[in-house]
Amino acid sequence: MAGRVFITGDKHGTFIPLFGLVKKFELRDTDILIIAGDAGYVWEENYNYTIDSLQQIFPGTIAFIDGNHENHTLLNDLKISQWNSGKVHQVGERVYHLMRGEVYSIYGNNFFAFGGARSVDKDRREEGISWWKEEEPTPDEIEYGKNQLIKYSKEIDYIITHETPLFARGYISRMKEIDEGYNLPALLDSWYKTVINAPRLKKWYFGHMHVDKLITPKLRGVYNDFLLAGDEKPIPWA
Ligand SMILES: [Fe+2]
C-alpha cells in the first residue's frame, strides 16, 4: 500500500497536536507529515533531544520547510543529502528539512517546496538567538525557485510555501501589513499566476498566517489542521 502524505502548518516546537493525532488516528511508518514552515523543532543547540522525541511520537517521516522562526544557523550547518529526488538537510533518521526550490517525488506526487519569510516581530528579537537573517530567501534562492517552478510546472502536484501570496492576505485578518522592500509575497503572486492552471496542480499550501482557510479552490492556509494531501476535510486530533 502506498504511504500517505499529511500536511499541517506552524507547530513552533510543540508536540501537543502530534500527540493528539497519534492518539486519534492510526498512523503507519510509511506516513509522511509535511509541515509548512515554523516547525520550530530545530531551535536549541541540543535540538537532537527534540528530534528524538519527535521520532518517538510520530512513526513515519517528518519533512518540514523552514519558516521564519527556525534556527537557520543550525539548519544550514546540516549535511545536504537527497530524499525523494530533491535536496534536503537531514535533521534526524526520519526528519528532513526540505530546501528552498526543491521538488520531491513522493508516492507518485511531486511537491515543490519553498520556505522562508520575513518576521514581523524581528525588531523585538535578537540576532543569532531568536532571529536569523537567513529567514528571508536570498535573490539567488528566489531565482532558483522560480526556475524550478517553471521547469517542473507541468509535473507539480502540490506546492508548499511558508510565505503567502500577497493577494491572499486580503482574505486573512492577521498581518496585513508588509514591510517596505519586502517583495516575496508579491513575487508569490506572480508564481501563483504561473502555476495555478498547470495541469497537475492540486493544491498550494502555505503556513505563516496561522489560519486554516481555503483562499481559492487551489490555495489553502494551514495551521492547526492535519490534512491528507489534496483532501479538504481535516483529521480530528484535538
Ligand atoms: Fe512564520
Image: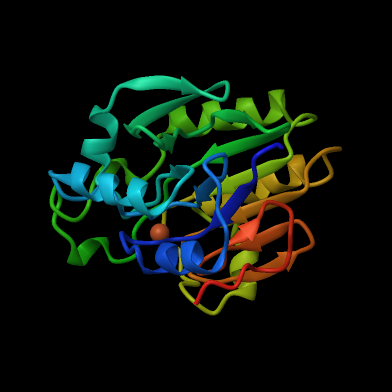
Q: x, y percentage for residue 220?
A: 66, 61
Q: x, y percentage for residue 14?
A: 32, 64
Q: x, y percentage for residue 223?
A: 51, 66
Residue 179 seen anywhere in this rendered image of the structure: no
Q: Where 20 falls versus 78 (above or below)? A: below
Residue located 79% across and 62% down the image = 217
The N terminus, quarter of image: top right
Ligand 1 found in image quarter: bottom left
The quarter of the picture where residue 89 lies is: top left
Relative depth, front residue between 82 and 61: 61
Looking at the picture, the colour scheme in use is rainbow
Relative depth, front residue between 104 and 55: 55
Across the whole image, how many numbered discs are drawn on residues?
A: 0
Relative depth, front residue between 215 and 212: 212
Residue 136 seen anywhere in this rendered image of the structure: yes
Residue located 80% across and 30% down the image = 154
Q: x, y percentage for residue 213?
A: 64, 71
